[in-house]
Image (cartoon, coloured by chain):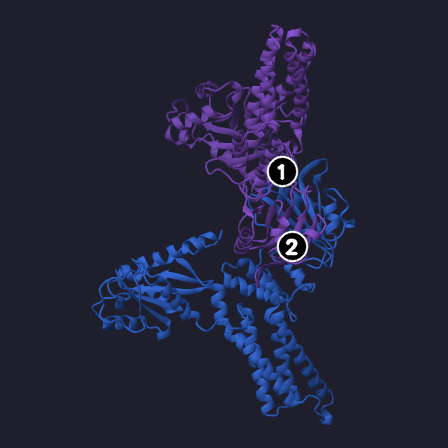
Chain colours: A purple, B blue
Amino acid sequence: MAKSTIVALSTPSGIGAIALIRLSGLDAFAITQAIFKGKILSQQNSHTAHFGYIIDGQSIIDEVVVTIYKSPNSFTKENVVEIGCHGSSYIVQQIIKLLLKNGAEMAQPGEFTQRAFLNGRMDLAQAEAVADLIASETAASHATAINQMKGGFSKRIKQLREELIHFASMIELELDFSEEDVEFASREGFKSLLHKIQAVISPLIDSFDLGNVIKNGVPVVIAGRPNAGKSTLLNTLLNDERAIVSDIAGTTRDTIEEILVINGIQFRLIDTAGIREAQDQIEAIGISKSKLKVAQANLVMYVFDIELPVEEVIADVKNLDKQEEEVLLVANKSDKILSSKIPKAAIAISAKEGLQIEELKKALYDRVLGGKIAKSDSLITNLRHYEALRNTQTALENAQKGIDASISGDFLAMDIRQALFFLGEITGEITTDDLLENIFSKFCIGK
Amino acid sequence: MAKSTIVALSTPSGIGAIALIRLSGLDAFAITQAIFKGKILSQQNSHTAHFGYIIDGQSIIDEVVVTIYKSPNSFTKENVVEIGCHGSSYIVQQIIKLLLKNGAEMAQPGEFTQRAFLNGRMDLAQAEAVADLIASETAASHATAINQMKGGFSKRIKQLREELIHFASMIELELDFSEEDVEFASREGFKSLLHKIQAVISPLIDSFDLGNVIKNGVPVVIAGRPNAGKSTLLNTLLNDERAIVSDIAGTTRDTIEEILVINGIQFRLIDTAGIREAQDQIEAIGISKSKLKVAQANLVMYVFDIELPVEEVIADVKNLDKQEEEVLLVANKSDKILSSKIPKAAIAISAKEGLQIEELKKALYDRVLGGKIAKSDSLITNLRHYEALRNTQTALENAQKGIDASISGDFLAMDIRQALFFLGEITGEITTDDLLENIFSKFCIGK
């Protein structure tokens, strides 16, 4: 248990019915007791709540409920106190000031979770999932974060790493006896372990694209000629959905982008007004910003009037300069009588009449995620994990090549050590202060 | 206990480490249990916290800590459950949706406190103090709200009301035996009770001005000729104070007013830029808005250059058209060599050099509150209480006159019933649905 006792407001700031102030550390009970008029906290059972008053000398600051969690049965595995007071900023400030005066220290961002990690309550990937969970805004990103928080892939990585450690120690043993020319570590056994590890980490690496989509959403640029009905389509898509989106209090939106949630995945719709208004024809895209948006988009939804001659549609799409699978063709105004052919790949809709909108949404979803939602529930959503896995993969490939070339044990040991290092970085068995600070500084204070 | 079980988010909305969802009602445990994977809540002791998962069928929504409070040992005196989940809007929404699906109802604003009142946990004045407490931003308004929440004056009012009820029942008895011309209720005893009640409620009525000042602050208009140094003074006052004000997170400020806190009282400084910029001379006040501000202000701080001839100062002040005690004269630029007399009542300061600023603050405070902070800690801050007390006073005065004029018992009984009604309104012994709705609808949801 850390010697210092930290304190922070753990609920969002602002006015509300209740605010929670959390303390963690060796002296959490004693520090709280110094300003608490009520039962003797240290004599109470863990996981019990106690009514009382926070006092500053003679004056009462608030009626509160104090809940105590005794080490090691708490979030941080330390002594933890939660003070539930009235949700007034003034009161919260007064109570925190009193606690600081009595020996508590202000918690750094993420310090509670960092202590939970350092005290072995969770591994690093799980700790990172806590932040993802708090930030999650859709069903899919939430499910991924929950899975990761519950252990997810990190359990398997830990297991594999242990097997690798066992092999590494055999190799090290060989090095100690290098003059004897014995082979403690079976090269065949090592090769099959390498395969096993690769079989786990390759799908994880591959899942990053999808995981990233789930966590951060899919940017979709809407392009098309003037009067193709892009704005109407955007409105139809959003009106349909807005009730659901605004139902989630606190959902933040980028001012330029509109969020459309399909099956729990965020599609960030970006209207290319610049293209539309500045120019008459899509082939004359002149504005670099809009061009850039199209170039960066995972997906371009090209909307055209169903009466536009098919060769012009094809020419427009060619000018977008995207891969075929990156463009979704949408033939709008299907309520009009169809006088010309439309490309086979296009979906005919009517934004105005709301026809085939569900089909369009399904097409959008399938184009990005079709068949990609793996049976496995292990997805990489974190760039740090992705990079560590990639580095592991490289190290293991080098080891593999080394065995094939029958290199000596000491070179092999170097590659294995590298792989162990990178695998350990994911779950936090290997950490540096910089790494920890980088991770936890992104947390909110009080977590 | 109410049959319906209500639910609401009780912590401020937004992203944070922890959010608290609160349920109250007969089925609070059963409804929570339906979505909680963990211990059997109804079998646990009151005031205990339990780790577990909120589940929706097979999928986990969140890791939570559920704290249970068994009736009648809870805030509402009903069964209460607090679910501490991760502070994500998405998770909060999901959990509340699940609880609603399982039979909970969305709480109305203030409904938890309303139930606490209806179930006898607190009287109406105490319930109202909860809202004041949450809104309190200064030490003084906080202390007043805490005192009122702890019972404050309402205990005494309840006592006096019971004595009055006793007397009323004697009078009613007289009416039953009216033909016999007996006097069960001693008129002398009643007169001394009336004195006792008046002795309690008069100071309370008188305390409303002060109570209002403590709760809502004192509007102070700063007036003066151009270049008198009003802006510099405002900055000097605020710079000195701003560190303290901004220290309190979530302090809201009116955009036009600046808040200066002196000894825990808010002074809302209003700069009359209109007067200053539109006209050269204060006697030429032409802008009705500024005039109105001056007219409405509890206090006008008239700032003048220390070199301005005293007769001109007097003429300016006369033009303000305020009572003498409503104007604080501030002779600025005291760092200059003094060549003319200044009015006796004026405080000489230097805004630029920061001279005598503490003295000015003390003068501001004393002018408004000097000698008024009563020894008694009972203050009326609520307009509703003030009006009920005033109405009580009138009814009692009528009763007094009635006795003096030896009116008959039935007329006396009417006045007493009126007094009982108004006294009962304060503590909530007499309530109407309208009254309750009016009070609790101003609460936040979740309280």
Instruction: State the mark number for residue A116.
Output: 1
- Which label number is shown at residue A197? none
Of the 4 image quadrants, the one containing the C terminus of chain B is bottom right
**Residues at marks 1 and 2 touching, judged by CB atoms closer than 8 Å:** no
- Which amino acid, mark 1? Ala
Is A306 situated above or below A437? Answer: above
Quadrant including the N terminus of chain B: bottom right
- Check disc 1 and report its element: helix, strand or loop: helix
Query: Does residue A284 appear anywhere in the picture?
Result: yes
Secondary element at tag 2: strand
Residue A275 lies, in percent from the top left, at: 41, 29
Q: Chain of mark 1?
A: A
Residue B63: x and y in percent read: 67, 40
Q: Badge 1 local density, few (<14 within 10 Å), some, or many (20+)?
A: many
Q: Residues within 10 Å of mark 2 (few under 14, many from 20)?
A: many
Q: Which residue is mark 2?
A: A65
Q: Given the image, what chain letter belongs to the residue carrying mark 2? A: A
